[in-house]
Amino acid sequence: MQLLAAVLFMGLVITTLHLEVPLLLSIHIELILFLAVVGQTAYALVMKPSQKLSYSHPIVLPLLLVSLYALAPMLSSLVNDNLWILQDGEYKSLVKILLLAPCLYYLLIQPKNRDLLLNSIVFFYCVLGVYFMYRYFILGEAREFDGRPLLSIRHGDPNFLCTFFSMMVPLALLQAWRAVTANKRAQVALHLSAATFMVVCAFVTQSRMGILALLMGLGFLLTRKFSDSRKVAAVKVGAAVCFVMMVAAIALEGSLAQRFSDINDKSSADRLLTYENGFKVFADNPFFGSGMHKARDYFYANSQYPHFQSEFKPLEVHNTYLSVIAELGVMGFVAFAAILIWSWLSVWRSQNPDRYFLLTSYFILAMSSLTVGISYKDLVLLHLFVLAALASPKKVGTL
């Protein structure tokens, strides 16, 4: 029951399709599934003797990390606006995801659950890809000034979408490789198809940094020797096909090629202005920051953006690490960095033969974060915990 609730919850947060169904919204289906996952995890940790919670339990460190990161916006709000953030719906969503992340980690460190959960996650991202293509090509949801996708859904910004699709490509290839070693040809074809489809989705977004991160990540993956099995060559061939498709798309597709050739466009100029704003906000509020999503309030003042263009909304800081330190200060940045470092070390120290797929996914996410602010995004935080869990050994402590 706990595993089923986790799968269904991931389906909701990834695809966001339930937001189009009034009945599901009226019964608060997302909250119900969230409580089911968290409640059953707590029950397993407290009531089951074989899985009793102790300081040595693998879930303790993830719980500590998310607790520190959840407290950071509260400390910033306490200093800046007397805890107004407790009324902020986005902060409540962040806390909800931070509570769920260790539960997902707890399920994934159990080898019996990994394939089902990971296959489900890959499938849901493909569903998101279909939904994305429909809203962009059929409904025509795009930005007026450059024609890039801008969907009227949660995380509908093209840079967010490119990051999500790109970071999932190595995990789809991981499942393809596992299917190769198990001689399951149908699954190999399915996962290679999923990886290729997400590559196409990433390119449709025309997000330069996300595409570059994907190119570099797959290039790294192709040069790794992660198994002596000859069957692995099939997966490498699949990855090579994806790589060639991306290079061909950059070389041949007109609008995408123009995006890379016109690197000094308005988008890049605005991004530099957000960096300037981020540094100045941090300098003014070094310890506790300006508050969650408050850095954009200083955008016009700090960037000296022409006021006659102020019909455009103030921009967020387009760098994950700079946005965290500007909005949550050093205290919040340390908490966020702790999650990043823990996830990285979990993957880097892993002895699993599939660690290179996990490293590639982490690299793509980390590099994409340089030009987009995604520190509060549920899919990003959950992904870091997914990577750390998949890197864990097959037998884990008391489980």
Image: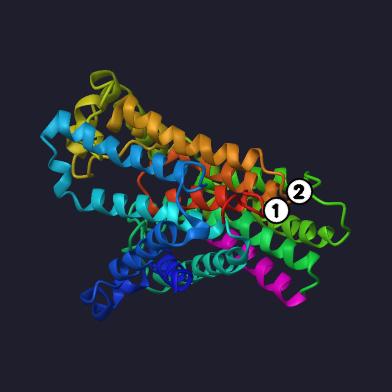
Question: Disc 1 or disc 2, which is closer to the eye?
Answer: 2
Disc 2 marks a residue whose amino acid type is: Leu
Checking the image for residue 30, the label placed there is none
Q: Point out residue 326 in the picture as x, y percentages from the top left corner.
A: 30, 29
Q: Point out residue 397 in the picture as x, y percentages from the top left corner.
A: 59, 50
Looking at the rendered structure, the secondary structure element under dot 2 is helix
Most distant residue in the bottom direction: 23
In the rendered structure, which disc, 1 or 2, sits on the residue that comes first in sequence? Answer: 2
Does residue 158 appear in this view?
A: no
Q: Which residue is mark 2?
A: 222
- In the image, the segment drawn in magenta is 185-206
Q: Are marks 1 and 2 in contact (CB under 8 Å)?
A: yes
The answer for how far apart the CA atoms under marks 1 and 2 are is 9 Å
- Please tell me which residue is depicted at 64% across the width and 38% down the height of the picture: 348
Q: Does the stretch in magenta take in 159? A: no
Disc 1 marks a residue whose amino acid type is: Phe
Asked if 75 appears above or below 155 in the picture, the reply is above
Q: Nearer the viewer, residue 283 or 130?
A: 283
Q: Which residue is mark 1?
A: 243
